[in-house]
Amino acid sequence: QVQLVESGGGLVQPGGSLRLSCTASGFTFSSYDMSWYRQAPGKQRELVATISRTGVSINYADSVKGRFTISRDNAKNTVYLQMDSLKPEDTARYYCNAARQFNSYWGQGTQVTVSS
C-alpha cells in the first residue's frame, strides 16, 4: 500500500522556520522525483520545490527561492522541506508528491500557518 505521510507543520511567527518531512512507503522511493506543493484557501495548488531521484537536480518556485531548501534521504525514504524566513503568504497546506512517468502519489498534507 502506497503511503506518503507529511509531518512538521504548525503555527510559526513571521520570520520563523519550520522543517517539513514526508516519509514514503509501498513503492521504490529512490526511483521517484519528489516534490512539495502547497494550497492556500481559495487558491490553486502550486508547486513549491522538486528534487530529482538522486538529488542532483533541484528546482524552486520563484516565491520561495533563497528561503526554502528541499532535500531527500533515500536510505530513510524521506524528503524534507526546510522553510526559513517564513512569511504570512506562505500559509497553506503543504503536500508531498512522488512522480515517475505515469505514476503520481500524494500525501494528505500538513498545515503551515504563519501569523503573529
Image (tube, rainbow, N blue to C red):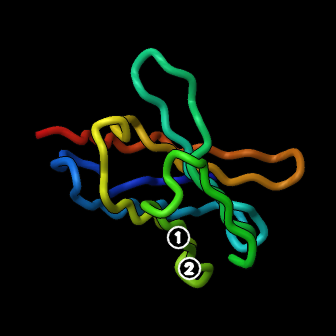
Residue 49 visible in the displayed image: yes
Dot 2 crowding, Cα within 10 Å, few <14, some 14–19, many 20+:
some
Specify the quadrant of the image occupied by residue 54: bottom right
Report whether 43 appears left or right of 19. right
Specify the quadrant of the image occupied by residue 110: top left
- Residue 78 circle label: 1
Q: Position of residue 114 (x, y in %)?
A: 24, 42
Marks 2 & 1, CB-CB < 8 Å contact: yes
Residue 1 visible in the displayed image: no
Q: Amino acid at mark 2?
A: Asp
Identify the residue at horizontal 38%, vertical 35% (top origin): 92
- Residue 17 circle label: none
Q: Position of residue 109 (x, y in %)?
A: 44, 42
- Element on which disc 1 rests: strand
Q: Amino acid at mark 1?
A: Thr
Q: Quadrant of the C terminus?
A: top left
Report whether 30 appears left or right of 17. right
- Element on which disc 2 rests: strand
- Outermost residue toward the bottom in this view: 75
Q: Position of residue 59 (x, y in %)?
A: 67, 60
The residue indicated by pointer 2 is 73
In this view, the residue in front, 71 or 16, is 16
In this view, the residue in front, 95 or 105, is 95
Identify the residue at horizontal 40%, vertical 37% (top origin): 93
User: Disc 2 versus disc 1: distance between alpha carbons?
Assistant: 5 Å
Dot 1 crowding, Cα within 10 Å, few <14, some 14–19, many 20+:
many
